[in-house]
Image: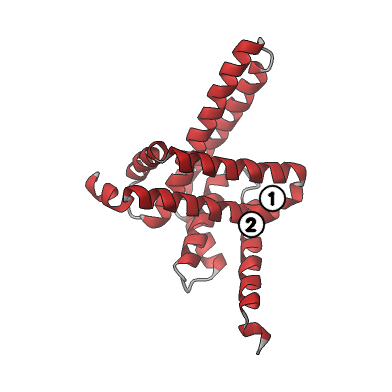
């Protein structure tokens, strides 16, 4: 049997594609202001692979990267601002008394879960319904995050694990990004399937 026709070879190629996509995400996110662009592009590429799109990785990635470029800058600024405020709040919270610390840390954790869950669902819905308005997608992403909160928690655990891996081994950021997006897409798809989001989006237009 020819090696290039084996299942192992095809899986190896797929693994290398995800590694390359992770590297591309990390490099494209370096300005920070483009973190939304690179993340949405990564979701689009993974969705394309799942649909067996004939377009190449670079073509799909940079086509989406340039699409609505300035609108995505505002999304990046919003995300970065949220992370900065959260970081400052946690620093201040750690200086408080123990009882207040617990309360504020719980609020901070819940805020992070809600925002990350909403963004993941928004990115995934965008790959499924690119012609829908961002306002409609965001509305349904919020609904999806709340109504399928168990899946939201599972997605948050996956993100935390990825962050922990990168914190321990910083170079792993060039490996885990695309795999994390893939897992987030699978989790979000499960949530969508549970509440028939396609029908919901049509009804809420």
Going 66% across and 61% down the picture, which residue do you hit? 19
Residue 119, horizontal then vertical, whole percent: 47, 42
- Between residues 188 and 125, which one lies in front from this camera angle? 188
Residue 120 screen position, x and y as percent: 48, 45
Q: Residues within 10 Å of mark 2 (few under 14, many from 20)?
A: many
Q: Which residue is at the front of the view, 67 or 130? A: 130
Q: Mark 2 touching mark 1, by CB under 8 A?
A: yes
Q: Residue 29, position in %: x, y?
A: 62, 48
Q: Earlier in the sequence, mark 2 or mark 1?
A: 2
**Disc 2 target residue:** 22
Q: Residue at x 36, y 38 (%)?
A: 143
Q: How many marks?
A: 2
Q: Residue furthest top?
A: 97
Residue, disc 1: 173
Looking at the picture, the colour scheme in use is secondary structure
Q: Toward which corner of the image does residue 67 lie, by quadrant?
A: bottom left
Q: Tell me: residue 36, above or below residue 48.
A: above
Element on which disc 2 rests: helix
């Amino acid at each position: 049997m020819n090696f290039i026709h084996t299942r192992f070879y095809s899986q190896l190629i797929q693994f290398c594609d995800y590694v390359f996509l992770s590297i591309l995400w990390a490099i494209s996110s370096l300005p920070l202001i483009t973190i939304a662009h690179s993340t949405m592009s990564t979701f689009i590429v993974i969705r394309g692979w799942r649909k067996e799109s004939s377009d190449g990785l670079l073509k799909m990635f940079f086509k989406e990267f340039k699409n609505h470029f300035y609108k995505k800058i505002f999304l990046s600024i919003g995300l970065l601002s949220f992370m900065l405020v959260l970081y400052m709040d946690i620093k201040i919270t750690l200086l408080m008394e123990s009882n207040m610390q617990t309360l504020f840390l719980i609020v901070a954790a819940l805020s992070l879960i809600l925002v990350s869950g909403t963004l993941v669902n928004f990115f995934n819905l965008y790959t499924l319904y690119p012609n829908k308005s961002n306002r409609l997608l965001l509305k349904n992403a919020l609904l999806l995050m709340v109504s399928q909160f168990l899946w939201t928690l599972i997605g948050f655990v996956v993100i935390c694990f990825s962050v922990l891996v990168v914190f321990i081994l910083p170079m792993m950021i060039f490996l885990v990004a695309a795999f994390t997006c893939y897992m987030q897409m699978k989790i979000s798809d499960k949530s969508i399937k549970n509440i028939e989001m396609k029908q919901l989006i049509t009804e809420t237009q």
